[in-house]
Image: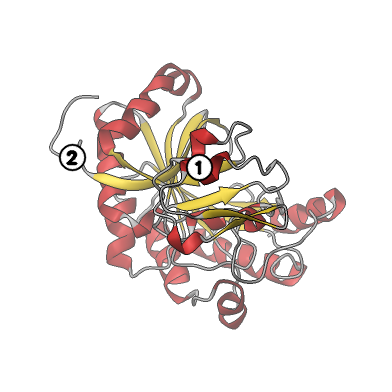
Amino acid sequence: MAQTQHSQITGQVFNIQRFSTHDGPGIRTTVFLKGCPLRCAWCQNPESQSLEPVLLLNSDRCTVCGRCIKACPHGVNTIDCGKLVMEREKCTFCGACIPACLIEARTIEGKTMTVEEVMTEVAKDYLSYESSGGGLTISGGDCEMQPAFTVALLKAARSEGIHTAVEITGVYPWDKVKAITDEADFILYDLKHMDDARHIEGTRVSNKHILENARHLVEQGRPILFRIPLIPGYNDSRENVEATARFVADLFGSAVSDKLELLPYNNLGEDKYDRMDFDGPRPKHSRQEDDYIAELNALVAAI
């Protein structure tokens, strides 16, 4: 990566996933940033919600060997009645316990990275981007929580000829959303629920700015794909899916089958709640039946 004035801007990153095929066109590298203004009851990346690092412990793998106790300089870990106990409030995320765990039952999610460090990882798959029409996607969390870092990454990718995409909630006022999306080639935009009261119930925030910003982006003619993460019993009813599809159709003044994507529920992140001792309700859902998803897709296609 060429050195620029933005190369050393730092941000909080919790994962860089290579060879992604569901986060925009082509083969992509998805950079997941920490921090999210929403508190979705079904969040599949609860470790992303805070800007601070999070320590995850897979208790099922832990053999209570005690090596982490010796390694930790802050007395976080103890053994009580044959079980490992962690006083998480003492943890400074120094990482000393990570290499000490021989079975890799511990991870720290979240670290400070510069734009240059992130782009070094992204550039490794440049040939894949060229051949597939892929590139860099910035996700989260919500990258709107780290606007300066997000914009710097997008500009760095553009300078290297790499296609860019952002996945955003659109929950902030338009000027903040516009500052980020103006730098992106493609936008992935989640719509959680059309009813504001239900949106607040599920995410703890209003959908007012989300719907307003959706209109602004379409009016600007920006390349955008709207998506509904389908949560059983919350927003996967025929009524909400139809209302969302009609909203999107109204924005474009046309059919929406290629502008609205339905994402069946994915429960692969549910075990993270136990691993981080999450304080609050924990999602327990099953993926929708394929026949029902097909029915909802047919509903969208008919609008």
- How is this picture coloured? secondary structure
User: Which sits in the foreground, 32 or 229?
Assistant: 32
Looking at the rendering, which quadrant does residue 154 occupy? top left
- Where in the figure is residue 234, as x and y percent of width and height? 71, 70
- Where in the figure is residue 138, as x and y percent of width and height? 42, 44
Q: Residues within 10 Å of mark 1 (few under 14, many from 20)?
A: some
Asked if 118 appears above or below 251 in the picture, the reply is above
User: Which sits in the foreground, 281 or 86?
Assistant: 86
User: Which sits in the foreground, 283 or 68?
Assistant: 68
- Residue drawn at x 32%, y 55% as measured from the top left: 146
Label disc, if present, on residue 13 of the rendered structure: none
- In the rendered image, which residue does mark 2 sit on? 6
- Residue drawn at x 30%, y 26% as measured from the top left: 161
- Where in the figure is residue 111, as x and y percent of width and height? 38, 44
Question: In this orientation, does residue 255 appear?
Answer: no
Label disc, if present, on residue 70 of the rendered structure: 1
Can you tell which of label 1 and label 2 is closer to the viewer? 1
Q: Residues within 10 Å of mark 2 (few under 14, many from 20)?
A: some
Of the residues shown, which amino acid type is indicated by label 2?
His
Of the residues shown, which amino acid type is indicated by label 1?
Lys
Asked if 187 appears above or below 162 in the picture, the reply is below
- Where in the figure is residue 282, as x and y percent of width and height? 68, 65
Badge 1 or badge 2: first in the primary sequence = 2
Residue extending furthest bottom?
Answer: 197
Residue extending furthest left?
Answer: 5
- Callout 1 secondary element: helix
Question: In this orientation, does residue 266 appear?
Answer: yes
- Callout 2 secondary element: loop
- In the picture, the quarter occupied by the N terminus is top left
